[in-house]
Amino acid sequence: MRLTKLAVRGCTGATLALGVVGVTATSAQAAAFVTPYVNVNVREEPTSKSAKLDVYPAHGAVLGLCWQFGETIRDNGITNNIWIATGKKGGLPWAWVSAVYLKGDEYAGLDPVRDWCGHGI
C-alpha cells in the first residue's frame, strides 16, 4: 500500500476549520461532507482487509477529504472501487470508507478530478 500512502500525502496542506481536529486538504481541494446510508466501517487503508478503526452511523455527515482507488466492493447492488479519506482515527492521519456505502454518485459527491487524493503528485 505504499503507493496509496504516497498518494494520500498529496492531500495534506491547509487546515480546514470545520470542527474536526487535524483534518487537512490541499488548497486545490474543497472537502465536502459525505453521508453514509447505512452504518459503514472505517478502515485504516482503502481495503476491507485492513484494520477497522470505527463505524460511522447511517445518515450522519462525515467530512470527506478526497478519494482514492482501492479494493472493489460489491454490496447492496453496487460495485465500486472508490474509497473516501476522512479525518484522523486511531492515531492515524487518515481513515477510509468505501463509497459504496455513501449517498450520491460513485465519488460520494466529491469532484472526480479536483478531489482525487493523488492530485498534483
Image (cartoon, grey):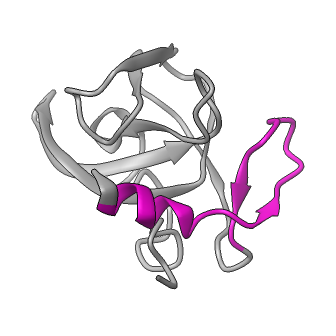
The image shows residue 46 at horizontal and vertical percentages of 31, 42
Picture quarter containing residue 77?
top left
Left of 103 or right of it: where is 69?
left
6 or 89, which lies in front? 6
39, above or below 36, in the image: above
Q: Residue at x 74, y 67 (%)?
A: 13
74, above or below 41, in the image: below
Q: Please tell me whether residue 73 belongs to the stretch shown in magenta.
A: no
Span colored in magenta: 3-26
The image shows residue 106 at horizontal and vertical percentages of 30, 55
70, above or below 58, in the image: below
62, above or below 14, in the image: above
Q: Residue at x 47, y 18 (%)?
A: 53
| Labels in figure, total | 0
Asked if residue 94 shows in the view, the reply is: yes
Q: Please tell me whether residue 23 belongs to the stretch shown in magenta.
A: yes
Q: Residue at x 52, y 85 (%)?
A: 120
The image shows residue 14 at horizontal and vertical percentages of 81, 65
Q: Residue at x 43, y 38 (%)?
A: 96
Asked if residue 106 shows in the view, the reply is: no
Left of 78 or right of it: where is 15?
right
53 or 109, which lies in front? 53
**Outermost residue, bottom side:** 120
5 or 46, which lies in front? 5
The image shows residue 82 at horizontal and vertical percentages of 29, 53
